[in-house]
Image (cartoon, grey):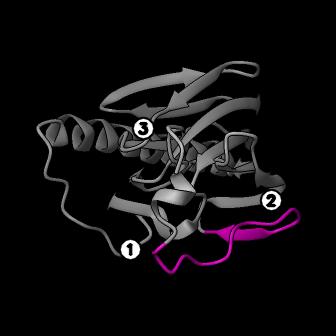
Amino acid sequence: MSGLPRSVLEEHEEEALPAAHRIGDRDERPWGRYVVIDAGIAASGEEYCKKIITVEPLQILSLQSHRLRRETWVVKKGILTALKDGKRLELRPGESLQIPADSIHCMANTGDDDCVVEATQEGICREEDIRRYMDVYHRSTEMLASPQAPENFTAYREILIDINKARVNRKHRISA
């Protein structure tokens, strides 16, 4: 092999990887849905996958990381509450966030309207690369053995508290 760096795909070619995403793939999740709008192999030899993710009002994705991919999120509609390595951020339409591989992160929508995010994944783009550490929908999780674990768990719980307060306020507005 030449002196060129190996792509992520080449580094993991011995592993039995599930099929890559294809344009038009979609899935409904407890927090909302996604649809793949672009996918393929970049000039660098890495996979990429671009999704439109819709996070429904008062929903949160799992606290998670990915070993084999990095992501760029661009908010298209609504306000995204993002958690990245223990830090909470509020992103508005046009704002973006870089999520490196192994970064502990989540998306949430603490508002009353759908939040739409364009997420570009680069590396090995498989749903099987999701490592969940906390999940409100009771999907399996694993232990987060990291010095940043307490701040990530605390920040995630704070977002959950805000979502629950908003649900109570919404219920009172509706019943009033």
Separation (CA) of disc 3 from disc 1: 19 Å
Q: Which mark is residue 35?
A: 2
The x, y position of residue 91, in whole percent, is: 61, 22
- For residue 77, say whether it is visible: no
* Residues under numbered marks 3 and 1 in contact, where contact means CB atoms less than 8 Å apart: no
User: At label 3, which amino acid type do we have?
Assistant: Asp
User: At label 2, which amino acid type do we have?
Assistant: Val
Q: Residue at x 62, y 44 (%)?
A: 122
Among numbered discs 1 and 2, the one appearing first in the sequence: 2
> How many numbered callouts?
3
The x, y position of residue 161, in whole percent, is: 36, 42
Viewer-nearest of discs 1 and 2: 2
Provide the residue designation for mark 3.
162
Up/down of 151 relative to 57, above or below:
above
Up/down of 34 relative to 123, above or below:
below
Among numbered discs 3 and 1, the one appearing first in the sequence: 1
Start-end of magenta stretch: 14-29
Left or right of residue 33: residue 9: left
- Residue 133 occupies quadrant: bottom left
